[in-house]
Image (cartoon, helix red, strand yellow):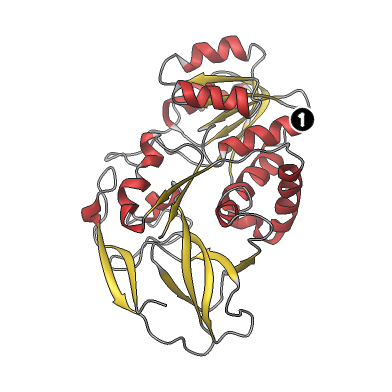
Amino acid sequence: MTATNRQFRLIRRPQGAVQAADFDFATEALRDVQDGEVLVQVHYISLDPAMRGWMNESKESYMPPVALGDVMRAIAAGKVVASKHPNFAVGDHVTGLLGVQEYAYSNGQGLTKVDPSLAPLPLFLGALGMPGLTAYFGLLDVGQPKAGDTVVVSGAAGAVGALVGQIAKINGARVIGIAGGADKVRYLTEELGFDAAIDYKQGNVAEALKALAPNGVDVFFDNVGGAILDAVLMRLAHGARIVICGAISQYNNKEAMQGPANYLQLLVKRATMRGVMVADYYPRAMEAITAMGGWIAAGKLKTREHVVTGIETFPDTFNKLFSGDNNGKLVLKVA
């Protein structure tokens, strides 16, 4: 085991897109674990849009911001290499908020054991992890699609959106994905089985929805916000349900976020708009993991992980989330 630990510490609140200068790529010496602690060697780090919000100095959030000087917060997967904790042994594989670093000390709170013999570790950061739980409960509990409903998903080729569309198809819905680029549109329709897909970079989303959803949108699962949310609001069916999962189009704004201009359609269509927070569903996690694991095994649910190697690439790799250069769940392989 190496005697040092490389880690990214947040030293400046980003303005717009994240830059390398917003972090200190530091090296520190490892110490012995204390009673009740484990030391985890981090193998894979999940890169998620929510991390951009954690970098901001904001009191209007579900989690406190990462303090300046602290290791950048991130969900990760790794292996216990030293333990003085009764519930974890050397050799256990775990996931948790381990941060953007090579090694992490933990008191065990928030750590979850996983079995890499059942699925590769990156899958526990994707379909069998936070994105999977978000997709499963956000769609089924909040969106409540019925067979025959028209379900629209923005950010549809991303880690959450790709799963949402497939789960909707499994439940008998007609699914339209919104994504950026011809390759992603083909991926949605030809590989994942979406009924249709809209390339927002090449066409008018509102006009495309008129043609593809002539009877309106019953469920909209939104990962993007901004202009796309406004376009879908104008195409709602009576009693539609909108699931607010994220607003990735707004996270790098230097000015105030763009709110929905067409929100009065919620009144006109007697529709609902509700946010989904995955932490609310952690007590039911095994329900989603069991269902999705079964669908994966049966070939009904496909996953794709975009793995980039090298912890030192973190700032540039993270920005792939916002440029659209990632294909599937974005994961940073530490070594």
Residue 258: give x, y in percent of width and height. Answer: 38, 33
Residue 181, position as x, y percentages in the image: 44, 23
Residue 76, percent across and down? 49, 61
In the structure shown, which secondary structural element does the residue marked by tag 1 occupy? loop
Please indicate whether residue 132 sits to the left or right of residue 321 in the image: right
Q: Viewed as shown, does residue 84 lie left or right of 53?
A: right
Question: Which residue is drawn at the image coordinates 38% and 38% (left, top)?
Answer: 322
Image quadrant where one finds the N terminus? bottom left
The answer to whether 27 appears left or right of 292 in the picture is: left
The residue positioned farthest toward the left in the image shown: 21
Please give the name of the residue rendered at 42% of the width and 64% of the height, measured from the top-left corner.
Answer: 99
Residue at figure coordinates x 49%, y 59% from the top left: 75
Question: Is 219 rendered above or below residue 285?
Answer: above
Q: Nearer the viewer, residue 57 or 38?
A: 38
Residue type at tag 1: Lys
The residue that disc 1 covers is 146
200 relative to 297, above or below = above
